[in-house]
Image (cartoon, grey):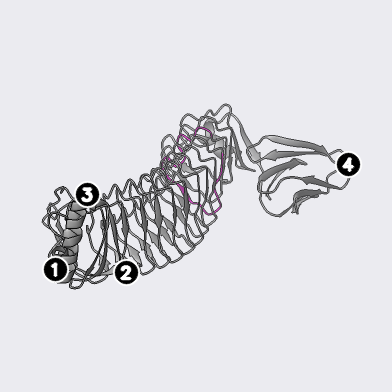
Amino acid sequence: MKQQMTLRSLLVIASLFLGLNLHADVVTIHVETAGTLSSYIASNEKDLITSLTLTGDLNGSDIRFIREMAGWDVDGDATSGKLSVLDISGANIVKGGDYYYYDINNNFYHTSDDNIMGKFMFHFTRLTSITIPNSVTSIDNNAFSYCSGLTSITIPNSVNSIGDGAFEECSGLTSVTVSSSVTSIGGWAFNRCSRLTSITIPDKVTSIGSYAFWGCKGLTSVSISNSVTSIGTYAFFGCTALTSITIPNSVTSIGEGAFAICSRLASVTISNGITSIAAHSFTNCIKLISITIPNSVTSIGTYAFSGCSELISVTIPEGVTSIGEGAFATCSGLTSITIPNSVTSMGIGAFARCITLKEIHNKNANPQIMGFNALLEIDKTNCTLYVPEGSYSAYRAAIEWGDFVNIIEEDITSTSQIQSSNIKVYTEAEAIVIEGAKPREQILLYTESGALVQTIQATCDIVQINVPRGHTYLIKTAGKTFKFTL
């Protein structure tokens, strides 16, 4: 050790004599015994070193010294240390030594376990780059929180968990490589990492914690692996640059407000494993124009899609039994709604202020129980209410439903093949086929929202209409209406 110290002292003297910029040098030290880092660095050098590479064993005392070098001491006070680049990839974190930080509640933090990046270990330091030891198995809560100068981080393959708030408020972080061994991402883990542009969730991750990417306003793309089963509350809240997201079939729960105020989110595909859409899930996603709600969903929570002003058409799948309070409130671009037979109740203001709504297709023969102002400010003189055959009188007598000027009975089913009287309608490749139409029978093709696409006059027993796939159509002929999705 004396030889190492002598060599280091000679380097310092030579640097001063030659006028070299010592603090620009990369300093490399092997710590033979945990807790002795301070003995390798002279007090007049400590605050000058900007780049440090360490090998050997490091405990709480060493971490405390590194924190002081990196601008933040054990008491949470700023120091004059300039350390910004730290490479400890060849070192080991070992338990023992002094505490390296304590908070305002007098919680003292130590290296209490081997191979753990402990709680608040580098919290608030001036580090711009850190290379984590290859032996580390977990990054604990707030280990790097508020490291606003940190620009990139590579999490080694040994790490299997990222704790709550691990990188919270790392506002300079632009790039994160998450190792394939990570199985969980804690709540607030990357909260308000405002410059983070993309993240790939590894294949072994099963849960994304609450607020994990809250306020990551630079995030443009997220790849969620098929292993994820849950997305926590407000997990992607305020990710204003996010334009699209695919939620895999493995996901069975999405927390409240998971994608609220994602103002650029244009399309969402929800997996078939989801049984409920939680409250505020997509609130104020003002660019959302399409949403696919899977058949597995049974309830739509309060304000789930409220404020989605560019959403044009919504088909609520059979199986949904309740639509929550304000679920589609102020969806001012909504022109068409299809409500399945399974829906029995709608909450207060469920479709309030959907001011451009032109048609509602309600499949339930019994008018649903509705909360106060469920259809507030819908223009009931220009919006047509379509109801099942034989239910006109029930709707005309029902509260709110009876206020519609135009209530029309229709017989609409949706399947790959429908037969009514002598008319048979089915899909084939990229076409809708109508069999049994009488000569000169008029066949009308509409979009799901009711816009007329084509008028055809039958000239033979079989009529084929070629249409693009991926859309829903209405066929009206012989006094009947048929609905198909190709």
In the rendered structure, which disc, 1 or 3, sits on the residue that comes first in sequence?
3
In the rendered structure, which disc, 3 or 4, sits on the residue that comes first in sequence?
3
**Amino acid type at mark 4:** Thr
C-alpha span from label 3 to label 4 = 97 Å
Q: Position of residue 320 (x, y in %)?
A: 50, 52
Does residue 123 belong to the magenta stretch?
Answer: no
The residue indicated by pointer 4 is 459
Q: Report whether residue 125 is seen.
A: no
Q: Residues within 10 Å of mark 3 (few under 14, many from 20)?
A: few
| Quarter of the rendering occupied by the N terminus | bottom left
Residue at 41 percent across and 39 percent down: it is: 348
**Amino acid type at mark 2:** Thr
Secondary structure type for disc 1: loop
Q: Please provide the residue range marked out in magenta.
A: 313-333
The residue indicated by pointer 3 is 19
Q: Position of residue 84 (x, y in %)?
A: 27, 52
Task: Give me the disc on residue 97.
Answer: 1
Task: Give me the disc on residue 137.
Answer: 2
Q: Nearer the viewer, residue 29 or 155?
A: 29
Residue 17 versus residue 97 in the image, above or below: above
Q: Residues within 10 Å of mark 2 (few under 14, many from 20)?
A: many
Residue at 64 percent across and 41 percent down: it is: 448
Foreground mark, 2 or 1? 1
Task: Give me the disc on residue 206.
Answer: none
Secondary structure type for disc 3: loop
Foreground mark, 3 or 4? 3
Foreground mark, 1 or 4? 1
C-alpha span from label 2 to label 4 = 73 Å
Secondary structure type for disc 4: loop
C-alpha span from label 3 to label 2 = 43 Å
Foreground mark, 3 or 2? 3
